Amino acid sequence: MSNIIFYFSGTGNSYSIAKGIQKEIGDTIVVPLLKAEDYKAAEYNIVGFIVPVYYLHVPEIALKAIKRISLRKDQQVFAVADYGGTLGYALQDIREALADEDVILQEYKIRMPGNYILEYGAFPKAYQEKILKKAQIQISKIAGSILENKSTGYIEPNLIAKLFHSRSKKQMSLFGEIGSELYTKEQCVHCYQCVKLCPTKNITIGEGNLIWGSKCVQCMACIQWCPQKAVSHPLMKKNRRYYTNPNVVVNQSGEFEFK
Ligand SMILES: Cc1cc2nc3c(=O)[nH]c(=O)nc-3n(C[C@H](O)[C@H](O)[C@H](O)COP(=O)(O)O)c2cc1C
Ligand code: SF4
Ligand code: SF4
């Protein structure tokens, strides 16, 4: 393969964008960002990063993984940040994380359905479909731009992001504490899909129940993908609607697959 795309994804949106771009540009491998150490990114022609936005930023776990990657100065490097409503500082984060690599980053953004079930339920289906249809068009445009190796400008935070920035930092500092309050309801069938999916191995199997530790990065995977809707949290209101990307499934090993 000539090109490589790294993704970080809780509910499949970022993964689905990675697969969409892979399909359009061809000759590309798609791998989880947290497994980047298994690949020599500097050996590929094009390197891409697809990440969601959490509280106006790239999730810290993803940003740390990006910082650890070595690249060549003459490599084509692009990043796509996907978000539910306000993009914020995500592309600035990636630009800064790659500063030492001396590469010119091609910056893109795609709006996707929001997934933060601790704050809100899934958008209505028709609205999700509208967003996903637009996203598909954008994926094609971005792929075209990547193939032409077009330079892009910087994507900077807007005024809303600047106004809410102080709140975002505070919220991020609470991720571990909030995550440790997750729990299973009685309908849990002990399939352990949540355990396999958790990017920080934060869920351990106790005597008859699951225990959430303090390493949660709030990706929402354990809650949103549970086949029994058995994972809950004191912040979750009753009957809140679940969201996972409709084009993505989780296989037996807890890995994403494109439908
Ligand atoms: C903890 C958390 C914080 C989020 N914060 C933001 C945000 O600040 N701005 C935004 O537009 N979307 C925000 N979102 C929504 C996600 O960025 C969006 O749904 C993204 O496409 C999810 O990607 P994924 O399915 O690959 O995980 C947040 C989601 C989570 C879980
Ligand atoms: S994924 Fe759901 S049903 Fe399976 S072990 Fe986790 S909480 Fe239980
Ligand atoms: S505990 Fe759940 S929400 Fe937290 S990082 Fe693991 S899978 Fe994601």
Image: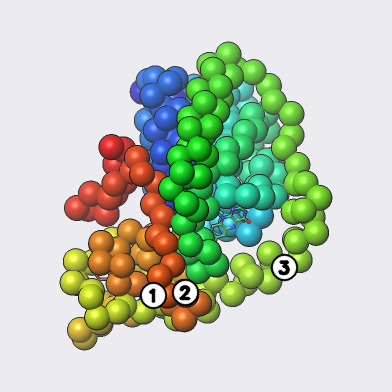
Return the residue at label 1.
232
Q: Is residue 63 visible?
A: no
| Marker disc for residue 167 | 3
Return the residue at label 2.
236
Quarter holding the C terminus is: top left
Quarter holding the N terminus is: top left
- Disc 2 residue type (three-letter): Met
x%, y% of residue 132? 48, 37
The residues tagged by marks 2 and 1 sit, at their Cα atoms, a distance apart of 7 Å
Give the mark nearer the N terminus: 3 vs 1: 3
Give the label, 3 or 1, closer to the camera. 1
- Disc 1 residue type (three-letter): Ser
Asked whether the beta carbons under mark 2 and mark 1 sit within 8 Å of each other, the answer is: yes
Give the mark nearer the N terminus: 3 vs 2: 3
Mark 1 beta carbon near ligand 2 (under 8 Å): no
How crowded pointer 1 is (Cα within 10 Å; few <14, some 14-19, many 20+) is rated as: some
- Left or right relative to 168: residue 191: left
The residues tagged by marks 3 and 1 sit, at their Cα atoms, a distance apart of 24 Å
Asked whether the beta carbons under mark 3 and mark 1 sit within 8 Å of each other, the answer is: no
Residue drawn at x 23%, y 49% is: 251
> Relative to 56, does residue 16 appear above or below in the rendering?
above
Numbered circles on residues, count = 3
Could you say which quadrant of the image residue 106 lies in? top right
**Closer-to-camera residue (183/7):** 183
Residue drawn at x 53%, y 64% is: 120
How crowded pointer 3 is (Cα within 10 Å; few <14, some 14-19, many 20+) is rated as: few
- Disc 3 residue type (three-letter): Arg
- Left or right relative to 23: residue 152: right
Could you say which quadrant of the image residue 3 lies in? top left
x%, y% of residue 141? 56, 22
